[in-house]
Amino acid sequence: MKSLRILAAACAIGLLAPAPGQAQPVQATKNPSAVPDYVPRSGQPGKDVVWVPSQQVLVDRMLDMAGVTKDDYLIDLGSGDGRTVITAAKRGVRALGIEYNGDLVTLSRRAAESEGVGDKARFVQGDIFETNFTEATVLTLFLLPDLNLRLRPTILGMKPGTRVVSNTFTMDDWEPDETVVVADNCSTYCRAYHWVVPAKVSGTWRLGDGELKLNQNFQMLAGTLTREGKEQSITEAKMKGSEISFLAGGRRYTGRVENDRMTGRHEAAGGSREWQATRSDG
């Protein structure tokens, strides 16, 4: 089951959790005897923050937003009672939970075995800031904004196209590609944000006899395209993983970035034509 970690100080700014003495339900299992005596409590202290469980309906929606498939490798940072990892594993996804609390790790492992997904759902005890998670194709979070911000440089260095989904909390000025609010069967912490790690394209690109200059702010782009001696500003320019799109001179350019090369097509009055560009600024 998935855990949210909320700093104890956050309660002072209105992030209310259930009463500390109120036990929270753990993952339902086919064999209740497999569940250890340990029962996590919402609001219990942790290394950086306190623990609050995610609501299952939002976990399901987060996985839908990420478009997880059996080819993905999902890593959940601060996996708590294992809900997100187990839910992903039930969809056939290979998934790993990183959790600092050893009792929660044990609970999660037993729940995964009881649910019949112990072969796909794995849990390790560790610090999310000291454990390598960069091999993930899908990353899930339920952490406060300051923790997300600390993780952000590593996330932005992951392979372009990696999907990142956060329960409730943002990545500061990195605007999400998608935001969803779950209204049904969800009472608190019902918002999810989705990002796709963009390829790094800022700089100068040689495009045939022309030049494409790009400035990049996360997935958003600005710049100019110079062709036949005429410089035009590009608009509606954006990255989605390794996919690039922009408008210039009345033409819609779409393409894909691989290392120092772009290839794609543009739409013009005469029909669709191929285009390609190579990085020219080293």
Image (tube, grey):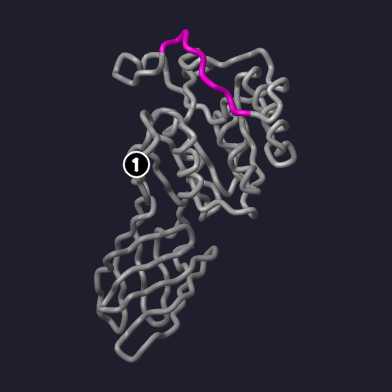
What residue is rendered at 72% in x and 22% in y?
A: 34
On screen, residue 107 versus residue 165, left or right, reads: right
Could you tell me residue 217's position as x and y percent?
Answer: 35, 51
Q: Tell which of 48 and 141 is nearer to you.
A: 141
Q: Tell which of 9 and 181 is nearer to you.
A: 181
Q: Give the total of numbered labels.
A: 1
On screen, residue 155 versus residue 145, left or right, reads: right
What residue is rendered at 49% in x and 35% in y?
A: 56
What secondary structure do most residues of the magenta stretch adopt?
A: loop
- Find the residue positioned furthest to the bottom: 270
Q: Is residue 27 magenta?
A: yes
Q: Is residue 267 magenta?
A: no
Q: Amino acid at mark 1?
A: Val
Secondary structure at numbered mark 1: strand
What is the magenta range?
19-28
Residue identified by numbered label 1: 181
Could you tell me residue 267's position as x and y percent?
Answer: 35, 81
Q: Determine which quarter of the picture holds residue 271.
A: bottom left
What residue is rendered at 29% in x and 18% in y?
A: 13
Tell me if mark 1 has few (under 14), some (14-19) or many (20+) residues whose alpha carbon lies within 10 angstroms of its own.
Answer: some
On screen, residue 112 versus residue 42, left or right, reads: right
Reply above or below: 151 against 205: above
What residue is rendered at 64% in x and 37% in y?
A: 96
Could you tell me residue 200's position as x and y percent?
Answer: 46, 56
- Find the residue positioned furthest to the right: 119
Q: Tell which of 62 and 207 is nearer to you.
A: 62
